Amino acid sequence: MSEQVVYGTTERGNATAIHRNYEYIKRYTKSNGAVYWRCIKYKSFKCKATLMTTADGVVLGKLSSEHTHSGNGATSLATKAVSEMKDKMNDIGATPSSSQGSVAVNLDPHVLMALPKRSLLNRTLQCHRAKHMRRDDGSGCLPPPPKDTNFDVPERFADMILFDSGSGSDRLIMMGCPELLDGLARAKLWLADGTFKVVPTMFFQLYTIHFELTPGTNPVGLYCRNQLS
């Protein structure tokens, strides 16, 4: 039975291949499509272990000596997970907590343990969001805040809208993320809270739902209403 590598990524975004808990970085590709990889620790540990795969990631065999160090596959997959969290921040304009939750719900326990501390991960995602929102001309990529309830939701945020009653004095908007709703369905603990202070002025109340599936709580959905029902 042929073995398949799992693809990861370095902190700089370069692709890596993970095989039997060891990580390799691409060295070159042959004209026949075979890809040659060498251990990512070839400099720091003078590790000469190499790997050969097909273009589709099927392992063709090892080419040289054994590794001079222990495996590090979980660390690479954790790095890849952080990269996916950054992508979530770009795609849905989510918070650091929601981006972490939408990716973490699909990770194996050993990868979760290899993730950075939550406080450090929050700062990393916040810095990424700030960088993403800046443009060369100094302007932001978010639309201006609406002044009343008669506004259209920008197309880039359409995937977040679960329900919108439409413009009017009693407008109700519900927002959520499909990945996090899946996590909510599997979570044993739900947390819900309403606030009247931290909410756009044209709305009356912001109500949020969180769940606990990985360490910490993750926001999964919220709704805004602009008058007491």
Image: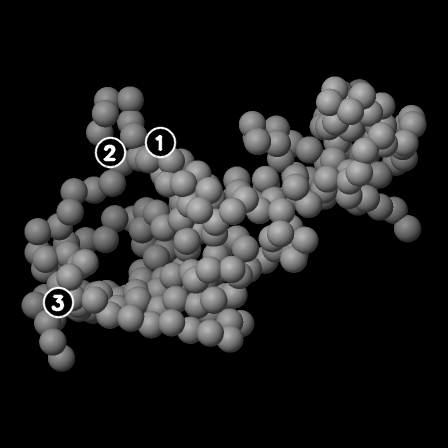
Vertical arrangement, residue 87 with respect to residue 55, above or below: below
**Residue 91's spot in the image, x, y percent?**
40, 45
Which of the two labelled residues, at mark 2 and mark 3, occupies the earlier sequence position? 2
For label 3, the SS is loop
Residue at left offset 41%, top offset 55%:
98
For label 2, the SS is loop
Residue at left offset 74%, top offset 20%:
43
Q: Disc 3 designates what residue? A: 204
Q: Disc 1 designates what residue? A: 131
**Residue 107's spot in the image, x, y percent?**
61, 55
Distance from Cα at disc 2 to Cα at disc 3: 27 Å
Q: Which label sits in the foreground, 1 or 2?
A: 1
The residue under label 3 is which amino acid type? Phe
Distance from Cα at disc 3 to Cα at disc 1: 32 Å
Q: Can you see residue 63?
A: yes
Which of the two labelled residues, at mark 3 and mark 1, occupies the earlier sequence position? 1
The residue under label 1 is which amino acid type? Lys
The residue under label 2 is which amino acid type? Gly
Please tell me which residue lies in front, 189 or 107.
189
Q: Which label sits in the foreground, 2 or 3?
A: 3
Would you say 94 lies left or right of 29 here? Answer: left
Vertical arrangement, residue 136 with respect to residue 120, above or below: above
Would you say 224 lies left or right of 133 here? Answer: left
Q: Disc 2 designates what residue? A: 140
